[in-house]
Image (cartoon, helix red, strand yellow):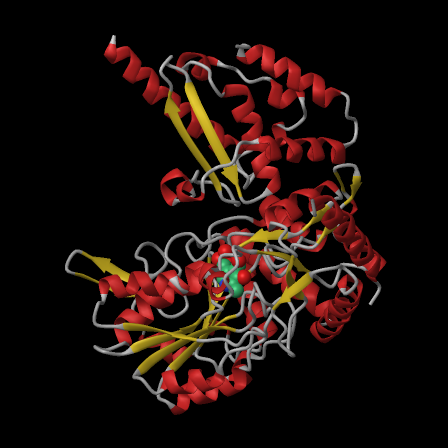
């Protein structure tokens, strides 16, 4: 299993070949397409991330080996690409690693404008939600020990 | 109209965004500000500022005169018969809340209803819902609209007959552009014994209102959508009504005399302007009225109708584009969706082309629900936009929809 930093490096490399903003967005949307299908039955308010202009759903669970498993979807292509990026980097990592990852890659690939509070796509909200769920899992594993 | 010269008054219009010339088509959310408005405000703040209505010293007197002059300018601009009928608020939203707290709470009686419509901005929905929480004896009625975005007048007249005490409707819809037939609505409301308030946030920037002639009891709008600053807006009300209304907020300026045995309230309009007002902003709004008057509201209306036509023509070639709001009488606003493309994706990519439009529900969620869509893309034009900008917009729409149709 690759570490968060290793996956980030790979993504930075993919994006660094592209000078054109359009190519970057195309790659982002392609990443969205690679997300495994998100069952319609979970596209409910319960799994919806607040603070996005488009609808974004996120569902997680803790696997047997104490890794956070993430599933996500969105009704907009760019939001789906953004959440897919986060899933790509953070899926199957431990709660602690998720909580401590600085995630510099977002800036490196030039998508940090999407982190600004006014951005209605809510990359910041997505990240906050993933970290919140990781925190719950971290507390669960700590108290189980 | 010398558009090139006018654009010189708005330095922001020469900005680059994402490496491209800015094409600002989000005027319905907020207009840009001409130098004249900013100069009036900075001049006041740098050389003339003091508190109003309080000091006997020269500066306070000067500031009071400037503030009251701004009121008179706004009154003249909207065709009010008296300056006192113009109350400074923070904007449309505050004006509506003032009406709900003061007028509606005091004058609507048990069982009476407030009549709004499906095309209202949240600012003309939520204050009434809050009122109903305090006054469960009142009712809220919602007039339907037709698929083309016009008011269903049959439904309006039917609902009006159901003990309506106050009609509160938008003059011009921010999401659809529909201009409502206000003369007919005012007459019908009055014949039914109801008062009528009009949300003119999207009307006052675009044509001559003539509020006294129209005869509405209340008219509300915001400064920032009409080339003025943020933080200032207007509640216009007929003087005899305002004089009977209780205050909305308490504090300085709105009182005649305060004692612990009881307080008497100031005359209108100061009764509704508790605390130190937004003096510089009021002066800025006055300057905005002067600026628009100098260009001429009739010229502005004609210019924007022309731009709307040019834009409709330009985007007619975009495949699968559906326009929401096709009222015959329409402001320069185009709400649209292209195929199944999400408005958010559209807005994000257009931004890369330097084009600013609004995407989402436009604070009209019940309207979006009415059309069963999550939101739209909205391009809204102002007199300072150009045919070239519209061409850039149409071109970017084609490129963007090709990119997003995958
Ligand atoms: C029709 C309409 N009403 C009310 C408002 C609220 O205006 P403000 O936010 O300036 O109070 C707006 C602006 O978004 C509007 O377009």
Residue B152 image offset from top left, x and y in percent? 49, 81
Residue B62 seen anywhere in this rendered image of the structure: no
Q: Residue B317: name its quadrant.
A: bottom right
User: Split into 4 quadrants, where in the image is the C terminus of chain A?
Assistant: top left
Q: Residue B337: name its quadrant.
A: bottom right
Residue occupying the point 65% across, 79% down = B328
Residue occupying the point 42% across, 13% down = A94
Q: Is residue A97 above or below residue B367?
A: above
Residue B375 image offset from top left, x and y in percent? 54, 56
Q: Nearer the viewer, residue B90 or A139?
A: A139
Q: Nearer the viewer, residue B1 or A133?
A: A133
Q: In the image, is B249 to the left or to the right of B111?
A: right
Q: Is residue B109 above or below residue A83?
A: below
Q: Nearer the viewer, residue B273 or B390?
A: B390
Q: Nearer the viewer, residue B146 or A43?
A: A43
Q: In the image, is A124 to the left or to the right of B385?
A: left
Residue A7 image offset from top left, x and y in percent? 59, 15
Q: Is residue B354 above or below residue B374?
A: above
Residue occupying the point 70% across, 16% down = A13
Q: In the image, is B355 to the left or to the right of B159?
A: right
Residue B306 image offset from top left, x and y in percent? 77, 71
Q: Residue B384: name its quadrant.
A: bottom right
């Amino acid at each position: 299993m690759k570490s968060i930093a290793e996956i980030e490096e790979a993504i930075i490399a993919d994006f660094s070949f592209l000078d054109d903003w359009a190519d970057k967005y195309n790659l982002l949307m392609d990443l969205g397409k690679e997300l495994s299908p998100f069952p319609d039955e979970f596209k409910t308010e319960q799994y919806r991330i607040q603070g996005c202009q488009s609808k974004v759903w996120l569902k997680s669970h803790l696997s047997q080996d104490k890794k956070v498993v993430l599933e996500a979807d969105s009704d907009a292509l760019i939001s789906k690409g953004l959440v897919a990026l986060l899933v790509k980097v953070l899926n199957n990592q431990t709660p602690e690693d998720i909580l401590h990852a600085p995630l510099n890659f977002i800036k490196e690939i030039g998508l940090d404008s999407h982190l600004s509070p006014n951005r209605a796509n809510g990359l910041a909200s997505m990240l906050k939600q993933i970290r919140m769920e990781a925190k719950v899992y971290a507390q669960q594993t700590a108290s189980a020990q | 109209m010398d558009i090139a010269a006018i654009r010189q008054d708005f330095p922001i219009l020469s900005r680059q965004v994402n490496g491209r010339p800015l094409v600002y088509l989000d005027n319905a959310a907020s207009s840009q500000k001409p130098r004249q408005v900013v100069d009036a405000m900075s001049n006041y703040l740098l050389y003339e500022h003091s508190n109003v209505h309080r000091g006997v010293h020269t500066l306070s007197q000067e500031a009071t005169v400037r503030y009251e002059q701004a009121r008179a300018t706004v009154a003249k601009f909207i065709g009010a018969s008296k300056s006192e009928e113009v109350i400074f608020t923070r904007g449309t939203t505050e004006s509506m809340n003032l009406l709900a707290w003061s007028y509606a709470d005091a004058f609507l009686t048990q069982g009476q209803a407030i009549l709004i419509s499906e095309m209202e901005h949240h600012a003309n929905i939520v204050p009434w819902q809050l009122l109903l929480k305090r006054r469960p004896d009142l009712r809220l009625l919602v007039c339907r609209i037709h698929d083309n975005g016009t008011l269903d007048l049959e439904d309006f007249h039917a609902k009006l007959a159901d003990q309506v005490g106050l009609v509160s409707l938008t003059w011009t819809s921010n999401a659809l552009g529909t201009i409502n037939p206000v003369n007919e609505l005012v007459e019908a409301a009055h014949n039914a014994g109801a008062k009528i308030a009009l949300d003119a946030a999207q009307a006052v920037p675009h044509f001559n209102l003539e509020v006294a002639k129209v005869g509405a009891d209340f008219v509300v709008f915001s400064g920032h959508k009409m080339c003025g600053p943020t933080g200032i807006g207007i509640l216009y009300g007929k003087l005899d009504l305002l004089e009977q209304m209780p205050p909305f907020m308490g504090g300085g300026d709105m009182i005649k005399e305060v004692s612990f045995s009881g307080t008497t309230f100031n005359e209108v309009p100061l009764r509704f302007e508790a605390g130190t007002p937004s003096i510089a902003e009021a002066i800025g709004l006055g300057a905005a009225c002067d600026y628009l008057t100098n260009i001429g509201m009739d010229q502005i209306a004609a210019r924007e109708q022309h731009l709307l036509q040019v834009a409709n023509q330009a985007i007619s070639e975009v495949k699968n584009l559906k326009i929401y709001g096709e009222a015959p009488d329409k402001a320069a606003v185009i709400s649209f969706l292209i195929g199944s493309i999400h408005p958010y994706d559209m807005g994000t990519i257009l931004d890369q082309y330097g084009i600013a439009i609004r995407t989402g529900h436009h604070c009209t969620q019940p309207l979006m629900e009415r059309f069963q869509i999550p939101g739209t893309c909205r391009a809204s034009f102002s007199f300072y936009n150009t045919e070239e900008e519209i061409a850039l917009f149409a071109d970017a729409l084609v490129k963007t929809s090709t990119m997003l149709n995958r």
